[in-house]
């Protein structure tokens, strides 16, 4: 059957996206897309995922480099580092970082890592890549909106990047940018043009997240292939679904907080400002509340923690199960605990504000709700442990990272119980204990989830493997480094050592940690170069990695591995497979395999799990 | 130029490492992939065991070297309750930490892939789920009960005999105000502030303000065993009064007045003896990011006996008298000098710690 003869136009090949039935007929017509539509303004969810990932990697390098700079200052406050002047110019004259830029670096490190890397880079990558592939859809509900979401993120990135170079420096009020510090130019250099650019960038970022989130939710709810009931979705999809729900419901509140801040900065309103004397004069603002901003910020800020955490949880569940050759334990309990975490995430935000002078009664309520959220987290940990119990553990690189994820999640999660309990939070609030807590749990642990995902799905993304030896080096150095950096910080926190200090040497109460700070800084530098090794491995493996020959290299049950080695736009060449079973049927299929993919019909007499 | 060389060097090292790594993978294929895979698997299991053992030794060593630096002796009555609660929480979470990490690494070692291992198809068990829902829930109930009890005690009203001291944060130091002989903090208005002669915006139309004492170097004197209530606010951006030795902390927010109270247990001299450190001093750290001088926003607390405190206080001149004296030699009162003009509100009826409970 010669289709070309009847149409004479290769562009009809697009039809394979619309109609499953005729896909074969069009298969051989795959026309060469223009470079720009294929790789730049692409609407293919797989390409957009890679765009998110690579942008995220670039941002991660910038954010991590900033931490190296400020760790040099913290570890060696007496010394000068001429190399810093090369990078930072007049902000580090003679190799000595200025306090203004120290605070700018701290602020940008937080903003970049939390939003650009662990939100856009993480859920942007894996929601885009996995949702259509794992639920059996040819693309997102709206590929165009999906493309827009990336490009909003891109423009947002440009604004943030430009802000690094303005004369007064980028925003420097901490990643939470509390007013009045962030609202008044007189208060800090970073509250000038840098702060405006920060706000514009973040507003665009919120737009990008909303476009993306709505798309993810719609796609998951409406575009599952035949037989893919909600209760047959892999846990990755459940986790990414709740991630999107969290974002869609809480990012708008953050945006409203930013809009009010812009008004206070430029249009003379007093939403957050009251009774301020600064720069030698009293301002006219009266009646606003600086605490209002904190409520608006943390209404996103706390769900944001779970936006960062949930994708890792989902991917770790999937990867632990696959590489243990054993079903995930408590599939339903996992879904219920994800639901619980999502619901509770919206009602715990004020535990970031126990020392703002809030009503003690309200504080009590937030203690209760906050500690409640530890229960679903505990359930997940025990389910992961039971998943690997009596498994047949294959220590591939993704498996190592998933195991590291569990270890770090426990270590970082437990300290949340200290901080969520208001009476204990009083002394620990804004100390290094907090730094240790959230870096372990939503920093490194989330990164381990992301690394596990990258190593696991790299073969699907690029048709090649990443180098294993480098992967193992990356794993062990990063895991050991994470503990060496953050474990001792708990001790500094117990001593009350405040975060966001440029120099501790004048403080009788905190200067005993000088050697420890130097030690931590040295480890940071080693870990930083190990991450560069990962980046190197990532990019070189795209072109030179060992080629994948088996379309299902890990022996996994989910649908993405039923696509061709190099899936085109539309994912499956023929019909989309139909799903007949749950995603974790790791058992004997009677033919020598230890797994049964989701699209294999039930055998006669076999009962569905 | 040296930057370029360093970059080139790093890239070169990476390429060398990569080539070695790649060669080892090629060798793998030559030696038979399955065989090498199982060797690698065993190696990784052992490396994880090694990591666990080294980690545990590391935790022990870390504790050994930092234990005496971590938690300074509690210097307030409230701090003692705090420390008890901290130890209970540490014990409970520490137990969970060790049990779960041991299980994790033991399973990694015990269930590493071997040729004959048949994974156990075990998908769910509701009894287990109930077990590990209720046990953590019960443990958390214990922590919540202890926590809320302490929380409501700490945030309760200060005792009637508490002395009142105002702490005002500004970029980048602390201003301390005592009510003076009348025991009443005079009225303030931020529109009356100026750095020359009215740093806290005292309203001179209020007689209660005229005997108020302001300490501008951030040195707060308080009395041993006497509860002290701090009335806290800020002149410009948000600061935070952090008192690590007393286990206390409260934000200083412009436009909002916050309070906290505690009872110091040891005088500064006693702490010097206890810590064996003649330079020991209670410090006030700013714990809320407030701008470029945040890290240097240091105040001190001197805890004294009642007698020592009285002697010290008697030597402090009232702020009003002080600025009058400073202004006098320069003849004519400079603009904005005391007494300032705009009277705000009723200057007779007011209470100590005005606005102490203003935030609702």
Image: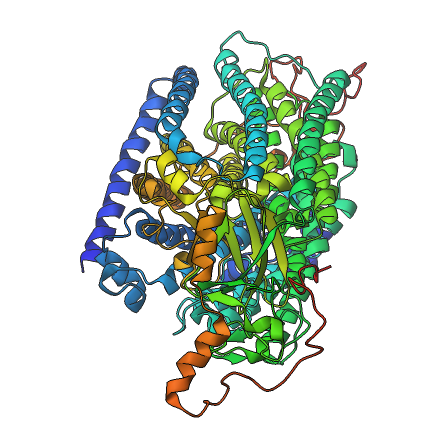
User: Which residue is pictured at 49% across the width and 40% down the height?
Assistant: A433
Image check: B170 left or right of A227?
left
Is B282 drawn above or below residue B125 in the view shown? Answer: below
Depicted B109 relative to depicted A19: above or below: above
Asked where in the image residue B55 lies, by quadrant, the reply is top left
Q: Residue at x 63, y 68 (%)?
A: B255
Q: Position of residue A495 (x, y in %)?
A: 44, 40
Say whether residue A535 is visible.
yes
- Image point 35% across, 49% down: which residue? A71
Residue B326: quarter of image = bottom left
B78 left or right of A531?
right
Residue B189 horizontal/vertical position (percent) = 61, 75
Quadrant where the image shows the C terminus of chain A: top right
Q: Is residue B250 left or right of residue B58?
A: right
The location of residue A60, given as percent across then percent down, is 44, 51
Nearest to the observer: residue A479 or residue B225:
B225
Relative depth, front residue between A439 and A269: A269
- Residue A601 x, y percent position in the rendering: 75, 24
Instruction: Tell me if I can see residue A137 in this picture.
Output: no
Indicate the colouring scheme: rainbow
Residue A15 relative to residue A101: left or right: right
Total residue callouts: 0
């Amino acid at each position: 059957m010669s289709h070309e003869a009847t149409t004479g136009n290769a562009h009809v090949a697009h039809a394979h996206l619309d109609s499953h039935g005729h896909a074969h007929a069009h298969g051989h017509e795959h026309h060469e897309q223009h470079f720009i539509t294929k790789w730049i303004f692409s609407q293919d969810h797989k390409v957009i995922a890679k765009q998110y990932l690579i942008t995220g990697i670039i941002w991660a390098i910038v954010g991590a480099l900033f931490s190296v700079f400020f760790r040099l200052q913290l570890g060696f406050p007496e010394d000068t580092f001429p190399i810093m002047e090369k990078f930072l110019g007049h902000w580090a004259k003679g190799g000595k970082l200025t306090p203004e830029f120290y605070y700018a670096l701290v602020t940008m490190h937080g903003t970049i890592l939390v939003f650009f890397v662990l939100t856009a880079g993480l859920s942007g990558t894996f929601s885009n890549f996995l949702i259509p592939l794992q639920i059996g859809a040819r693309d997102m509900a709206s590929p165009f909106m999906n493309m827009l979401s990336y490009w909003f993120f891109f423009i947002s990135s440009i604004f943030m990047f430009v802000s690094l170079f303005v004369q007064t420096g980028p925003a420097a009020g901490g990643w939470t940018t509390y007013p009045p510090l962030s609202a008044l130019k007189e208060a800090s250099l970073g509250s000038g043009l840098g702060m405006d650019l920060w706000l514009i960038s973040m507003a665009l970022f919120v737009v990008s997240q909303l476009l993306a989130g709505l798309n993810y939710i719609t796609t998951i709810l409406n575009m599952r292939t035949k037989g893919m009931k909600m209760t047959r979705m892999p846990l990755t999809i459940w986790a990414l679904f709740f991630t999107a729900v969290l974002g869609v419901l809480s990012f708008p509140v953050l945006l409203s907080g930013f809009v009010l801040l812009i008004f206070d900065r430029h249009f003379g309103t007093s939403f957050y400002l009251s009774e301020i004397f600064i720069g030698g004069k009293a301002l006219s603002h009266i009646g606003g509340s600086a605490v209002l901003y904190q409520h608006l910020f943390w209404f996103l800020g706390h769900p944001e923690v779970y936006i960062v955490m949930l994708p890792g949880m989902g991917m770790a569940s999937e990867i632990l199960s696959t590489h243990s050759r054993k079903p995930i334990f408590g599939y339903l309990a996992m879904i219920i605990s994800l639901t619980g975490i999502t619901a509770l995430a919206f009602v715990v935000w004020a535990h970031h504000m126990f020392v703002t002078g809030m009503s003690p009664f309200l504080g009590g309520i937030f203690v209760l709700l906050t500690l409640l959220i530890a229960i679903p987290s505990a359930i997940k940990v025990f389910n992961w442990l039971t998943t690997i119990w009596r498994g047949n553990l294959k220590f591939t690189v993704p498996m190592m990272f998933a195991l590291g994820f569990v270890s770090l999640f426990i270590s970082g999660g437990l300290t949340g119980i200290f901080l969520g309990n208001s009476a204990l939070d009083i002394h620990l609030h804004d100390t290094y204990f907090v730094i240790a807590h959230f870096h372990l749990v939503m920093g490194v642990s989330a990164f381990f989830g992301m690394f596990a995902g990258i190593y696991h799905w790299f073969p699907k993304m690029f048709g090649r493997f990443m180098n294993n030896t480098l992967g193992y080096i990356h794993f062990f150095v990063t895991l050991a480094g994470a503990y060496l950096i953050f474990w001792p910080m708990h001790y500094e926190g117990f001593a009350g050592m405040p975060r966001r200090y440029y120099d501790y040497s004048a403080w009788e109460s905190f200067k005993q940690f000088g050697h420890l700070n130097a030690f931590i800084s040295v480890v940071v530098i080693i870990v930083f170069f190990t991450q560069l090794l990962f980046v190197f491995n990532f990019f070189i493996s795209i072109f030179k990695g060992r080629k994948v020959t088996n379309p299902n290299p890990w022996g996994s049950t989910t649908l993405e591995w039923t696509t061709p080695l190099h899936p085109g736009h539309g994912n499956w060449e023929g019909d989309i497979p139909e799903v007949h079973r749950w995603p974790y049927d790791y058992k004997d299929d009677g033919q020598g395999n230890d797994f049964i993919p989701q699209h294999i019909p039930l055998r006669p007499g076999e009962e569905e799990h | 130029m040296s930057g370029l060389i360093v970059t080139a060097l790093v890239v070169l090292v990476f390429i060398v490492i990569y080539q070695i790594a790649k060669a080892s993978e090629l060798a793998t294929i030559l030696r038979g992939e399955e065989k090498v895979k199982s060797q690698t698997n065993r190696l990784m299991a052992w490396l994880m065991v090694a990591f666990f053992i080294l980690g545990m030794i590391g935790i022990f060593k870390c504790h050994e070297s930092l234990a005496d630096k971590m938690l300074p002796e509690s210097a307030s009555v409230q701090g003692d309750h705090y420390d008890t609660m901290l130890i209970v929480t540490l014990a409970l979470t520490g137990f969970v930490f060790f049990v779960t990490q041991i299980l994790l690494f033991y399973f990694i070692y015990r269930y590493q892939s071997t040729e004959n291992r048949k994974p156990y198809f075990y998908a769910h068990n509701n009894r287990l789920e109930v077990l590990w829902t209720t046990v953590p829930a019960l443990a958390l109930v214990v922590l919540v009960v202890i926590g809320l009890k302490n929380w409501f005690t700490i945030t309760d009203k200060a005792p009637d005999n508490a002395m009142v001291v105002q702490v005002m944060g500004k970029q980048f130091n602390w201003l301390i105000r005592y009510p003076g002989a009348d025991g009443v903090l005079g009225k303030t208005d931020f529109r009356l502030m100026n750095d020359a002669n009215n740093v806290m915006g005292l309203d001179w139309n209020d007689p209660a303000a005229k005997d108020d004492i302001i300490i501008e170097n951030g040195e707060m004197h308080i009395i041993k065993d006497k509860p002290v209530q701090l009335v806290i606010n800020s002149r410009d951006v948000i600061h935070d009064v952090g008192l690590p030795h007393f286990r206390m902390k409260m934000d200083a927010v412009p436009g909002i007045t916050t309070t906290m109270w505690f009872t110091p247990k040891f005088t500064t001299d006693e702490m010097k003896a206890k810590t064996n450190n003649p330079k020991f001093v209670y410090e006030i750290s700013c714990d809320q990011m407030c701008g470029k001088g945040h890290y240097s926003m240091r105040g001190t607390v001197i805890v004294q006996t009642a007698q020592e405190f009285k002697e010290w206080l008697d030597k402090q001149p009232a702020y009003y008298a002080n600025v009058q004296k400073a202004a006098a030699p320069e003849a004519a009162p400079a603009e904005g000098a005391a007494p300032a003009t705009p009277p705000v509100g009723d200057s007779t009826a007011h209470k100590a710690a005005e606005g102490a409970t203003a935030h609702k």
